[in-house]
Image (spheres, rainbow, N blue to C red):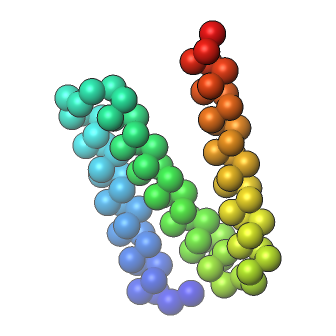
Amino acid sequence: MKFSTLLSVYIGLVLLLALSLGMAFMPLHGSLKLVVGLAVAAAKATLIVWFFMHVRYQSGLIRVFAAAGGFWLLLMFVLTAVDYLTR
């Protein structure tokens, strides 16, 4: 992997970290803060999986299974939240 790519990903992760830190101190409504925080976390996870786990350079089947794992994790979070909210 080229140094410029690694540097760009690093800068992106640091900027997303700064956004996470800034969101912690902003006086926003709880649900908006949660949505933005989850979006930032998803962006960081996507950068890590795509570049550092080398999914970018793999075949289509590997990408499908990586996406299926992410979908399964999302499904588990949604089902847990539905169970929690309906009690």
Residue drawn 71% across the image and 73% down it: 63
Residue drawn 74% across the image and 80% down it: 60
Q: Give the quarter of the figure containing the C terminus.
A: top right
* Residue 30 percent coordinates (x, y): 33, 26
Residue drawn 54% across the image and 57% down it: 45
Q: Residue furthest left?
A: 27
- Residue placed most toward the observer, 55 or 86: 86
Q: Is residue 86 above or below residue 63?
A: above
Residue 49 appears left or right of 37: right
* Residue 65 percent coordinates (x, y): 77, 66
Residue 56 appears left or right of 27: right
Q: Residue furthest front?
A: 86
Q: Is residue 76 above or below residue 30?
A: below
Q: Residue furthest top?
A: 87
- Residue placed most toward the observer, 70 or 17: 70
| Res 37 quadrant in image | top left
Q: Residue furthest bottom?
A: 2
Q: Give the quarter of the figure containing the N terminus.
A: bottom right
- Residue placed most toward the observer, 41 or 77: 77
Q: Is residue 32 above or below residue 42?
A: above
Residue 51 appears left or right of 23: right
Q: Is residue 21 above or below residue 69?
A: above
| Res 34 quadrant in image | top left
